[in-house]
Amino acid sequence: MEEEEKFDYTAKILLLGDSSVGKTCFIKRYIDNTFQDAYLSTIGFDFKLKFVTLDDGTVVKVQLWDTAGQERFRTIAKSYYKGAHGIILIYDVTSKKTYLSIKTWINQIKEQASNKISIILVANKIDSEDPREVTTEQGENLAKNYGLSIYEASAKEGINITESIKALLEDINKNISTMTNPNNISLDKDKDENPKKCC
């Protein structure tokens, strides 16, 4: 067994979005540089690993978590926000429904994730032959509304996959560089921030 590559820290990144927006294909393109048209919907979660060297020489062990987008699995996905450093929020440009769902995902992120977490928005499937239901301008307005960077992407053609993840990792690295314990990172909200109410 080969010795594991040396790295400075592990970054946990979640891919969120409705079912069939292309999360699994996005990860597959990034990790293996391959594409497969047909995938079964992810059940629960799955994650892949990749070592990435950033511009400043920092080596990051990237964990890309593929979470189920189906409504009935969203309560399961909530538990995986813990310890996450970044989120790639994806919608399908050929499906207005997945675009409109971004608001729901954003609300869940606000409830479950750290307010220091890094987030990017990805408009996927720009290569599709299906009619486009979400314009570039609509995507940019959505991103601006939430203060996010947006990338129009295609997992099939490999467009803006590496670029979007690199941008997210660079932002995560900036956050981590301000911490004194990068090997024991905790980005959870303070427990007292949202105290549970009784009755």
Image (cartoon, helix red, strand yellow):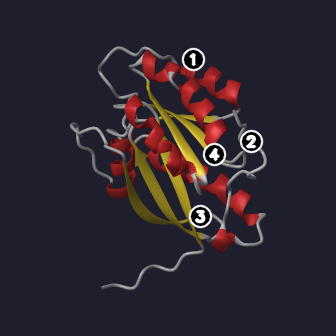
- Which of the 4 quarters of the picture holds residue 103? top right
Closest to the observer, 131 or 196: 196
Distance of label 2 from label 4 (alpha carbons): 12 Å
Q: Which residue is mark 3?
A: 54
Distance of label 4 from label 3 (alpha carbons): 24 Å
Residue at 43 percent of width and 64 percent of height:
50
Camera-nearest label, 4 or 1: 4
Distance of label 2 from label 3 (alpha carbons): 35 Å
In terms of secondary structure, where does tag 4 sit? loop
Distance of label 1 from label 2 (alpha carbons): 33 Å
Q: Which residue is mark 1?
A: 138
Q: Report crowding for label 3: few under 14, some 14 to 19, many 20 or more residues within 10 A (C-alpha).
A: some
Camera-nearest label, 2 or 4: 2
Q: Which residue is mark 2?
A: 194
The percent coordinates of residue 191 (x first, y second) are 73, 52
Say if 166 sits above or below 158 in the image.
below
The answer to whether residue 160 is visible is no
Dot 4 and dot 3 residues touching (CB under 8 Å): no
Name which residue type carries label 1: Gln
Q: Which residue is mark 4?
A: 113
Dot 2 and dot 3 residues touching (CB under 8 Å): no
Residue at 56 percent of width and 49 percent of height:
81
Distance of label 4 from label 1 (alpha carbons): 26 Å
User: Can you say which quadrant of the picture contains the N terminus?
Assistant: bottom left
The answer to whether residue 77 is visible is yes
Name which residue type carries label 2: Asn
The percent coordinates of residue 115 (x first, y second) are 72, 45
Residue at 65 percent of width and 71 percent of height:
184
